[in-house]
Image (spheres, rainbow, N blue to C red):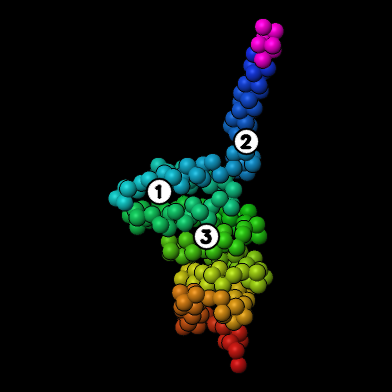
Protein backbone atom coordinates (compact mmCIF):
# COMPACT_ATOMS: atom_id res chain seq x y z
CA UNK A 1 0.00 0.00 0.00
CA UNK A 2 2.85 2.36 0.87
CA UNK A 3 4.56 1.67 -2.49
CA UNK A 4 1.31 2.32 -4.35
CA UNK A 5 0.91 5.64 -2.53
CA UNK A 6 4.47 6.72 -3.40
CA UNK A 7 3.92 5.72 -7.04
CA UNK A 8 0.74 7.79 -7.16
CA UNK A 9 2.52 10.82 -5.68
CA UNK A 10 5.40 10.46 -8.16
CA UNK A 11 3.22 10.20 -11.27
CA UNK A 12 1.09 13.14 -10.12
CA UNK A 13 4.15 15.34 -9.64
CA UNK A 14 5.47 14.35 -13.07
CA UNK A 15 2.18 15.31 -14.73
CA UNK A 16 2.14 18.64 -12.89
CA UNK A 17 5.69 19.33 -14.10
CA UNK A 18 4.73 18.63 -17.74
CA UNK A 19 1.66 20.88 -17.46
CA UNK A 20 3.76 23.62 -15.87
CA UNK A 21 6.28 23.52 -18.73
CA UNK A 22 3.49 23.66 -21.31
CA UNK A 23 1.89 26.68 -19.62
CA UNK A 24 5.27 28.45 -19.45
CA UNK A 25 5.87 27.94 -23.17
CA UNK A 26 2.39 29.21 -24.07
CA UNK A 27 2.83 32.26 -21.85
CA UNK A 28 6.26 33.03 -23.34
CA UNK A 29 4.85 32.80 -26.87
CA UNK A 30 1.96 35.15 -26.09
CA UNK A 31 4.22 37.61 -24.27
CA UNK A 32 6.86 37.77 -27.04
CA UNK A 33 6.94 41.23 -28.64
CA UNK A 34 5.91 41.39 -32.27
CA UNK A 35 8.87 41.16 -34.66
CA UNK A 36 11.10 39.30 -32.20
CA UNK A 37 12.27 35.88 -33.49
CA UNK A 38 10.42 32.94 -31.92
CA UNK A 39 12.08 30.64 -29.45
CA UNK A 40 13.60 27.38 -30.68
CA UNK A 41 10.74 25.40 -29.13
CA UNK A 42 8.07 27.18 -31.16
CA UNK A 43 10.05 27.78 -34.34
CA UNK A 44 8.31 27.18 -37.69
CA UNK A 45 5.02 26.06 -36.13
CA UNK A 46 2.97 28.60 -38.06
CA UNK A 47 4.99 28.08 -41.22
CA UNK A 48 4.02 24.42 -41.23
CA UNK A 49 0.35 25.31 -40.65
CA UNK A 50 0.42 27.83 -43.49
CA UNK A 51 2.10 25.34 -45.82
CA UNK A 52 -0.54 22.72 -45.05
CA UNK A 53 -3.35 25.24 -45.65
CA UNK A 54 -1.87 26.29 -49.01
CA UNK A 55 -1.54 22.68 -50.14
CA UNK A 56 -5.09 21.84 -49.05
CA UNK A 57 -6.71 24.70 -50.97
CA UNK A 58 -8.49 23.45 -54.15
CA UNK A 59 -7.34 24.78 -57.57
CA UNK A 60 -10.15 27.31 -57.98
CA UNK A 61 -10.10 28.70 -54.44
CA UNK A 62 -7.56 31.29 -53.29
CA UNK A 63 -6.84 30.90 -49.53
CA UNK A 64 -7.08 34.64 -48.88
CA UNK A 65 -7.30 34.26 -45.10
CA UNK A 66 -4.12 32.18 -44.94
CA UNK A 67 -2.28 34.58 -47.26
CA UNK A 68 -3.33 37.53 -45.09
CA UNK A 69 -2.06 35.74 -41.98
CA UNK A 70 1.21 35.00 -43.73
CA UNK A 71 1.70 38.62 -44.81
CA UNK A 72 1.20 39.89 -41.27
CA UNK A 73 3.17 37.13 -39.55
CA UNK A 74 6.18 36.44 -41.79
CA UNK A 75 8.39 38.81 -39.79
CA UNK A 76 8.09 36.51 -36.75
CA UNK A 77 9.27 33.41 -38.58
CA UNK A 78 12.71 31.88 -38.94
CA UNK A 79 14.22 32.82 -42.34
CA UNK A 80 15.25 29.23 -42.96
CA UNK A 81 11.64 28.10 -42.81
CA UNK A 82 10.63 30.39 -45.71
CA UNK A 83 12.17 28.73 -48.82
CA UNK A 84 9.87 25.70 -48.50
CA UNK A 85 6.89 28.00 -47.94
CA UNK A 86 7.67 30.07 -51.05
CA UNK A 87 8.15 26.83 -53.01
CA UNK A 88 4.66 25.75 -51.97
CA UNK A 89 3.29 29.05 -53.27
CA UNK A 90 5.07 28.54 -56.58
CA UNK A 91 3.47 25.11 -57.02
CA UNK A 92 -0.06 26.18 -56.05
CA UNK A 93 -2.59 25.65 -58.84
CA UNK A 94 -4.58 28.69 -57.69
CA UNK A 95 -1.52 31.00 -57.73
CA UNK A 96 -2.42 32.88 -60.91
CA UNK A 97 -5.92 33.60 -59.63
CA UNK A 98 -4.47 35.00 -56.41
CA UNK A 99 -1.41 36.69 -57.93
CA UNK A 100 -2.09 40.00 -56.18
CA UNK A 101 -2.25 38.39 -52.75
CA UNK A 102 0.75 36.17 -53.50
CA UNK A 103 2.79 39.18 -54.64
CA UNK A 104 2.04 40.91 -51.34
CA UNK A 105 3.26 37.90 -49.37
CA UNK A 106 6.43 37.59 -51.47
CA UNK A 107 7.19 41.29 -50.98
CA UNK A 108 7.02 40.71 -47.23
CA UNK A 109 9.20 37.59 -47.46
CA UNK A 110 11.85 39.42 -49.49
CA UNK A 111 11.95 42.38 -47.10
CA UNK A 112 12.26 40.07 -44.09
CA UNK A 113 15.09 38.05 -45.64
CA UNK A 114 17.05 41.14 -46.64
CA UNK A 115 16.56 42.76 -43.23
CA UNK A 116 17.75 39.58 -41.48
CA UNK A 117 20.72 39.19 -43.89
CA UNK A 118 19.39 35.67 -44.27
CA UNK A 119 21.50 34.47 -47.20
CA UNK A 120 24.54 34.15 -44.94
CA UNK A 121 22.79 31.55 -42.76
CA UNK A 122 21.00 29.61 -45.50
CA UNK A 123 22.21 26.29 -46.81
CA UNK A 124 22.91 25.63 -50.48
CA UNK A 125 19.55 23.87 -50.73
CA UNK A 126 17.74 26.79 -49.07
CA UNK A 127 19.26 29.21 -51.59
CA UNK A 128 18.39 27.26 -54.71
CA UNK A 129 14.88 26.43 -53.45
CA UNK A 130 14.09 30.05 -52.63
CA UNK A 131 15.49 31.57 -55.83
CA UNK A 132 13.88 28.93 -58.02
CA UNK A 133 10.49 29.45 -56.39
CA UNK A 134 10.67 33.24 -56.72
CA UNK A 135 11.59 32.87 -60.40
CA UNK A 136 8.65 30.55 -61.04
CA UNK A 137 6.40 33.11 -59.36
CA UNK A 138 7.88 35.80 -61.67
CA UNK A 139 8.59 37.87 -58.58
CA UNK A 140 11.62 40.12 -58.93
CA UNK A 141 12.88 41.97 -55.87
CA UNK A 142 16.03 43.98 -56.63
CA UNK A 143 17.16 44.28 -53.00
CA UNK A 144 16.86 40.54 -52.44
CA UNK A 145 18.73 39.72 -55.65
CA UNK A 146 21.54 42.10 -54.67
CA UNK A 147 21.76 40.60 -51.19
CA UNK A 148 21.85 36.97 -52.34
CA UNK A 149 24.30 37.68 -55.16
CA UNK A 150 26.75 39.22 -52.71
CA UNK A 151 26.50 36.29 -50.32
CA UNK A 152 26.33 33.43 -52.84
CA UNK A 153 29.15 34.45 -55.20
CA UNK A 154 31.94 33.75 -52.65
CA UNK A 155 30.31 30.37 -51.86
CA UNK A 156 29.90 29.20 -55.47
CA UNK A 157 32.92 26.93 -55.14
CA UNK A 158 31.08 24.79 -52.59
CA UNK A 159 27.88 24.49 -54.66
CA UNK A 160 27.11 21.32 -56.56
CA UNK A 161 26.32 21.48 -60.28
CA UNK A 162 22.55 21.36 -59.74
CA UNK A 163 22.63 24.38 -57.45
CA UNK A 164 24.84 26.35 -59.83
CA UNK A 165 22.44 25.72 -62.69
CA UNK A 166 19.33 26.59 -60.67
CA UNK A 167 20.91 29.77 -59.31
CA UNK A 168 21.86 31.31 -62.65
CA UNK A 169 18.60 30.13 -64.26
CA UNK A 170 16.66 31.87 -61.50
CA UNK A 171 18.66 35.09 -61.80
CA UNK A 172 18.32 35.16 -65.59
CA UNK A 173 14.57 34.50 -65.32
CA UNK A 174 14.22 37.40 -62.88
CA UNK A 175 16.49 39.60 -65.03
CA UNK A 176 19.12 39.79 -62.33
CA UNK A 177 22.39 40.88 -63.92
CA UNK A 178 25.02 40.49 -61.22
CA UNK A 179 28.47 40.17 -62.74
CA UNK A 180 30.27 38.82 -59.68
CA UNK A 181 27.74 36.02 -59.25
CA UNK A 182 27.64 35.04 -62.93
CA UNK A 183 31.43 35.11 -63.14
CA UNK A 184 31.83 32.88 -60.09
CA UNK A 185 29.22 30.41 -61.31
CA UNK A 186 30.72 30.36 -64.83
CA UNK A 187 34.13 29.47 -63.42
CA UNK A 188 32.72 26.68 -61.26
CA UNK A 189 30.48 25.39 -64.05
CA UNK A 190 33.49 24.93 -66.33
CA UNK A 191 35.39 23.06 -63.62
CA UNK A 192 32.36 20.88 -62.79
CA UNK A 193 31.07 20.42 -66.34
CA UNK A 194 31.14 16.65 -66.02
CA UNK A 195 28.77 16.76 -63.05
CA UNK A 196 25.92 18.49 -64.88
CA UNK A 197 22.86 16.59 -66.01
CA UNK A 198 21.43 17.44 -69.47
CA UNK A 199 18.70 19.64 -68.03
CA UNK A 200 21.19 21.48 -65.85
CA UNK A 201 23.44 22.14 -68.85
CA UNK A 202 20.48 23.39 -70.86
CA UNK A 203 19.33 25.70 -68.07
CA UNK A 204 22.83 27.07 -67.54
CA UNK A 205 23.38 27.69 -71.25
CA UNK A 206 19.98 29.41 -71.50
CA UNK A 207 20.75 31.61 -68.49
CA UNK A 208 24.02 32.92 -69.91
CA UNK A 209 22.58 33.34 -73.39
CA UNK A 210 19.68 35.30 -71.92
CA UNK A 211 21.95 37.57 -69.88
CA UNK A 212 24.21 38.23 -72.84
CA UNK A 213 21.25 38.72 -75.17
CA UNK A 214 19.69 41.28 -72.82
CA UNK A 215 22.87 43.33 -72.75
CA UNK A 216 23.57 41.99 -69.29
CA UNK A 217 25.86 44.81 -68.18
CA UNK A 218 28.62 43.48 -65.94
CA UNK A 219 27.13 40.00 -66.11
CA UNK A 220 27.53 39.89 -69.87
CA UNK A 221 31.19 40.83 -69.53
CA UNK A 222 31.66 38.24 -66.82
CA UNK A 223 30.29 35.54 -69.10
CA UNK A 224 32.76 36.41 -71.85
CA UNK A 225 35.75 36.59 -69.51
CA UNK A 226 34.90 33.21 -67.98
CA UNK A 227 34.75 31.38 -71.33
CA UNK A 228 37.66 29.05 -72.06
CA UNK A 229 40.03 30.33 -74.75
Q: Residues within 10 Å of mark 3 (few under 14, many from 20)?
A: many
Q: Residues within 10 Å of mark 2 (few under 14, many from 20)?
A: few
Magenta region includes residue 127: no
Instruction: Describe residue 62's horizontal placement relative to residue 142 as left or right.
Output: left
Q: Secondary structure at mark 3?
A: helix
**Magenta part of the chain:** 1-7
Q: Quadrant of residue 11?
A: top right
Q: Which mark is residue 130?
A: 3
Q: Secondary structure at mark 1?
A: helix
Q: CA distance from mark 2 to mark 1?
A: 29 Å
Residue pictured at 62% horizontal, 35% vertical: 32
Q: Main secondary structure of the magenta part?
A: helix
- Give the mark nearest the N terminus, 2 or 3: 2
The answer, for residue 68, to whether it is visible in the render is no
Q: Where does label 2 land, which residue?
A: 32
Asked if labels 1 and 3 touch by Cβ distance under 8 angstroms, the answer is no
Vertical order, 5 against 161 (above or below):
above
Vertical order, 95 against 228 (above or below):
above
Q: Quadrant of residue 115?
A: bottom right
Q: CA distance from mark 2 to mark 3?
A: 28 Å
Amino acid sequence: LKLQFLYLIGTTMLRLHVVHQHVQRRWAASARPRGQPPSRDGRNSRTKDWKAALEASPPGKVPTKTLAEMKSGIADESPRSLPALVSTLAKAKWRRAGRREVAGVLDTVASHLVMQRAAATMTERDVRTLLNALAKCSHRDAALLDHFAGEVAPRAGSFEARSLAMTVWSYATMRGTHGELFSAVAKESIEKAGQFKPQGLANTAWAYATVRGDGGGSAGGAVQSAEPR
